[in-house]
Image (cartoon, rainbow, N blue to C red):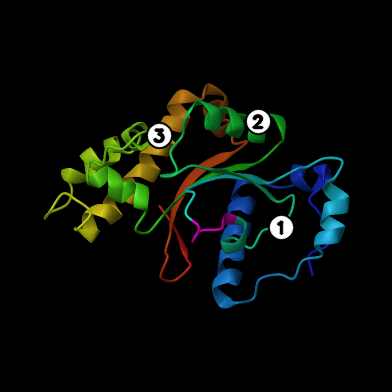
Amino acid sequence: MKNIAITKEIQDGLSPSSVLSDLLAGNQRFISGNSEELDNAALISQTTGGQFPKAVVLSCIDSRVPVETVLDQAIGDIFVARVAGNFENEDILGSMEYSCKVAGSKLVLVLGHQACGAVKAACDGVELGNITHLLSNILPAVKQSADEVDGALDSSNSAFVAKTVENNVKLTMDRIRERSPILKEMEDNGEIKIVGGVYSLETGKVEML
């Protein structure tokens, strides 16, 4: 049973690689049905005065991808930023900078997922209220995928959608480095890693890109 929250001392002893391995091991426990039992009361008590998460995850809002659950993480373990289509913006960049530079997290994980509704909508050129602006953040991935996949260039083509999901994660990682000198410098210095993966709705597995 997990009943000890991450402390500053524990966080300081972690490396970006060890944190990534830990998250992937948690995902494997989730898949295998062996998720850790949690003493939430103890974790709540220990984290009331502060927090020292090991990673920040940028994910989609999709209800089928509850981040802490699929990575088998508990109270105080990870920061999670969520927006439809798991792309970065100024506020999310600031949140990730806080997570790493101020709060000491060692890893930035951009987590896309299979059959993402926002990606499908971007592939179909949907225009509707504020959704139009949201989807504009995914269009660079749509355009890149159009040159890499055969067949229909809309959501009816599962291969096109899958490639766009992957490209969206990769381009988001690139833009994080471009738009956040703080995070890029931390990565260059080996203080953090910026990585990306895609979650399978069918299997529950996170595949790293």
Neighbour tally class for label 1: few under 14, some 14-19, many 20 plus, Cα within 10 Å = many
According to the image, label 3 marks what residue? 174
- Tell me which numbered mark, 1 or 3, is placed earlier along the sequence: 1
Could you say which disc has been placed on residue 74 in the image? 1
What residue occupies the far bottom of the structure in this picture?
Answer: 33
According to the image, label 2 marks what residue? 98
Is residue 205 highlighted in magenta?
A: no
Which is more toward the observer, 191 or 138?
A: 138
Neighbour tally class for label 3: few under 14, some 14-19, many 20 plus, Cα within 10 Å = few
Circle 3: residue type: Asp
Q: CA distance from mark 1 to mark 2?
A: 20 Å
- Tell me which numbered mark, 1 or 2, is placed earlier along the sequence: 1
Which is more toward the observer, 150 or 12?
A: 150
Examine the rendered structure and indicate whether residue 198 appears above or below residue 87: below
The span shown in magenta is: 63-67
Is residue 65 highlighted in magenta?
A: yes
